[in-house]
């Protein structure tokens, strides 16, 4: 039995993401194996893309060949799936690096061929044409780079950098749920670090030892503590300059990634991972320096009080 792949419908999960990407965004940023909606997918002649060769910068890339069904040059019959196509781009600056993307045409939308004023359209049916809108990336070479901003890498700490790298690998492979899971773990770990700072701060201020012990209990991995409770303790030492009004961005990040984990599709989780990346980067680029400052302060207070 021959499978008619053109009629194969994408799963419900794949169609849930409402955001439409431009063809350039699809080619350069889309993860693998998720159906992406575009306004209209036409292969662009030129794209902006990071050249990981000698350019080490975002450069202009030009189309080497237009979209071609895989296997179309073969001598034996037609390709088994003509909807799987490839395109390639060349870095215009160094002329050494090539980006090849393999994608599958998933779905088309019927669009009117022309806009007809309503006064003329009565009784007149405007003809439509199918326009390619839904596409899925099924391959990319070289593999997508994992970009961790330098300041973030420096401030996140070794363990968290590894988790963040894994989050990005998952994101690029279409595993959105796993990506937000790794991001949530970073938010929780950093909240725990803040709780430890808050406890040390309390100790330095001669707060009762039972109260300090209670604070530290919140980071005990064997005991469940709701994130709201953790955040309340961590919030006491969370830098004011990283807050936006009354909003603690850790709360915002935690709520977003948790929403993804508790019921959104892979694609929606990828959208969350992409959306929160700016807040995530800003908070964690700056939080570590503030934590270190407070730690130094606590150490100094402790030292001074002992030498009295
Ligand atoms: Zn280049």
Image (tube, rainbow, N blue to C red):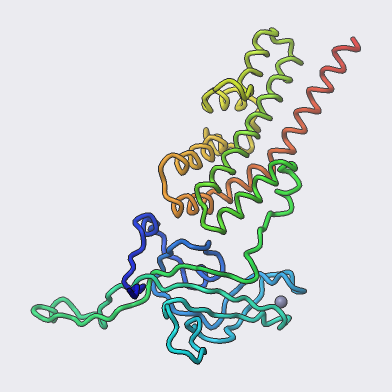
Among the 4 quarters of the image, the one containing residue 220: top right
Image quadrant holding the N terminus, namely bottom left
The residue lying at 84 percent from left, 22 percent from top is: 300
Among the 4 quarters of the image, the one containing residue 199: top right
* 158 lies left or right of 114: right
Instruction: Please tell me in which quarter of the rendered image ligand 1 is found.
Output: bottom right
The residue lying at 8 percent from left, 79 percent from top is: 123
The residue lying at 27 percent from left, 81 percent from top is: 129
Q: Nearer the viewer, residue 72 or 3?
A: 3
Extreme residue toward the left, this view: 123
Residue 140: percent from left, percent from top: 58, 70
- Residue 300 lies, with reference to residue 30, above or below; the image says above
The residue lying at 68 percent from left, 54 percent from top is: 148
Q: Nearer the viewer, residue 288 or 266?
A: 266
Residue 219: percent from left, percent from top: 63, 24
Extreme residue toward the front, this view: 1
Q: Nearer the viewer, residue 221 or 249?
A: 221
* 55 lies left or right of 146: right
Q: Nearer the viewer, residue 105 or 8?
A: 8
Extreme residue toward the bottom, this view: 75
* 31 lies left or right of 42: right
Residue 71: percent from left, percent from top: 50, 83
Residue 173: percent from left, percent from top: 55, 58
- The image shows a total of numbered marks equal to 0
Image quadrant holding the C terminus, namely top right
């Amino acid at each position: 039995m021959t499978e008619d792949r053109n009629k194969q419908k994408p799963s419900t999960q794949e169609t849930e993401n409402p955001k439409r990407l431009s063809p350039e965004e699809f080619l350069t940023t889309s993860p693998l194996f998720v159906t992406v909606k575009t306004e209209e997918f036409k292969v662009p002649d030129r794209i902006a893309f990071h050249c990981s060769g000698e350019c080490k910068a975002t450069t202009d890339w030009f189309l080497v060949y237009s979209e071609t069904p895989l296997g179309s040059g073969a001598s034996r019959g037609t390709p088994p799936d003509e909807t799987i196509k490839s395109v390639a781009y060349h870095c215009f600056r160094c002329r050494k690096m090539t980006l090849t993307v393999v994608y599958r045409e998933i779905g088309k939308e019927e669009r009117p061929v022309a806009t007809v004023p309503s006064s003329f359209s009565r009784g007149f049916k405007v003809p439509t044409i199918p326009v390619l809108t839904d596409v899925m990336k099924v391959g990319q070479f070289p593999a997508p780079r994992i970009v961790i901003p330098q300041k973030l890498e420096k401030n996140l700490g070794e363990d968290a950098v590894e988790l963040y790298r894994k989050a990005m690998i998952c994101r690029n492979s279409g595993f959105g749920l796993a990506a937000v899971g790794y991001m949530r773990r970073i938010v929780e770990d950093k909240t725990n670090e803040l709780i430890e700072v808050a406890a040390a701060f309390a100790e330095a201020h001669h707060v009762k030892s039972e109260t300090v012990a209670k604070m530290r209990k919140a980071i005990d991995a064997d005991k469940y503590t709701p994130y709201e409770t953790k955040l309340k303790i961590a919030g006491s030492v969370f830098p004011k300059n990283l807050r936006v009004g009354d909003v603690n961005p850790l709360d915002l990040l935690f709520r977003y990634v948790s929403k993804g984990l508790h019921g959104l599709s892979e694609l929606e989780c990828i959208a969350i991972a992409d959306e929160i990346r700016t807040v995530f980067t800003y908070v964690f680029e700056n939080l570590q320096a503030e934590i270190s400052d407070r730690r130094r302060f606590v150490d100094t207070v402790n030292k001074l009080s002992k030498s009295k």
